[in-house]
């Protein structure tokens, strides 16, 4: 997938290391999978990596993060929303900075960036110039200005998703290829070009 993406885009492509959903406490086998992925993805043209590891007590797993930072060198690394599941988000921010991550993706310890806006503002102030704080989680053109102006952040993350109908003509209803609470079988989630353009234009126009 990365090789195909790199054929079509000119912007840097960061790859997330996350072999499954759920928590951020990984087994030794899952860690081995991610280690092998780093090797293959580097060869396939990754421009950077996104990852995050926690301990059982909800603190950053600094030892494991450090190992992966060494593995991905000389490429930059972003610590993802695992920080939102930590027991002390501001202490976790300091740990991420000390480890050497260049960017931190967060919803401020809440389900969405808008809900976590007060904490994101604290994180931006605490981080200063040490690391880039990137709000993410439920960001849309309807709340982007409020989130950027309210937090002082200079970058943001958004999926800009839209659902498009499947091109299947024959549709066998009543069967799901996934879990019970899943999207309709004949609907596909894609990145919406118009939504992306609107967010980018809006982001550039906001004076901070």
Image (cartoon, rainbow, N blue to C red):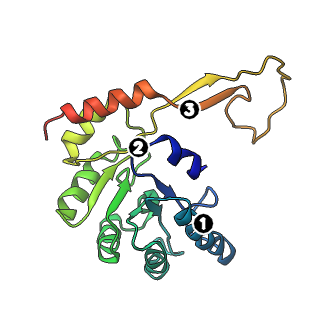
Name the element at disc 2.
loop
**Front of the two marks 2 and 3:** 3
Asked which quadrant contains residue 36, the reply is: bottom right
Separation (CA) of disc 1 from disc 2: 33 Å
Asked which quadrant contains residue 195, the reply is: top left
Residue 47, compared with residue 165, is above or below; it is below
Name the element at disc 1.
helix
Q: Residue at x 47, y 77 (%)?
A: 61
Disc 2 marks which residue? 112
The image position of residue 75, as x and y in percent, is 40, 67
Disc 1 marks which residue? 40
Name the element at disc 3.
strand
The image position of residue 113, as x and y in percent, is 36, 44
Disc 3 marks which residue? 190
The image position of residue 91, as x and y in percent, is 31, 71
Q: Earlier in the sequence, mark 3 or mark 1?
A: 1
Q: Residue at x 70, y 37 (%)?
A: 181
Residue 192, compared with residue 73, is above or below; it is above
Q: Earlier in the sequence, mark 1 or mark 2?
A: 1
Separation (CA) of disc 3 from disc 1: 25 Å
In the image: residue 114, left or right of residue 19: left
Residue 11, compared with residue 52, is above or below; it is above
Front-most of residues 144 and 171: 171
């Amino acid at each position: 997938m990365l090789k195909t993406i790199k054929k079509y885009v000119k912007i840097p492509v960061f790859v997330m290391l996350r072999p499954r959903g759920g928590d951020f406490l990984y087994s030794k086998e899952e860690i081995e999978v991610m280690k092998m992925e780093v090797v293959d993805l580097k060869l396939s043209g990754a421009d950077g990596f996104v990852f995050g590891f926690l301990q059982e007590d909800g603190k950053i797993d600094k030892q494991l993060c450090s190992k992966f930072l060494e593995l991905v060198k000389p490429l930059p690394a972003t610590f993802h929303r695992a920080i939102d599941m930590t027991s002390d988000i501001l202490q976790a921010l300091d740990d991420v900075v000390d480890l050497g991550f260049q960017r931190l993706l967060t919803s401020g310890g809440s389900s969405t960036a808008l809900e976590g806006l007060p904490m994101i503002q604290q994180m931006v102030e605490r981080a200063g110039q040490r690391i880039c704080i990137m709000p993410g989680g439920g960001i849309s053109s309807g709340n982007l200005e409020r989130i950027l102006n309210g937090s002082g952040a200079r970058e943001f993350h958004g999926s800009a998703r839209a659902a498009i109908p499947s091109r299947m003509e024959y549709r066998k209803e009543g069967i799901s290829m996934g879990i019970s609470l899943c999207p309709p079988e004949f609907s596909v989630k894609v990145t919406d070009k118009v939504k992306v353009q609107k967010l980018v234009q809006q982001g550039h126009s906001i004076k901070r």
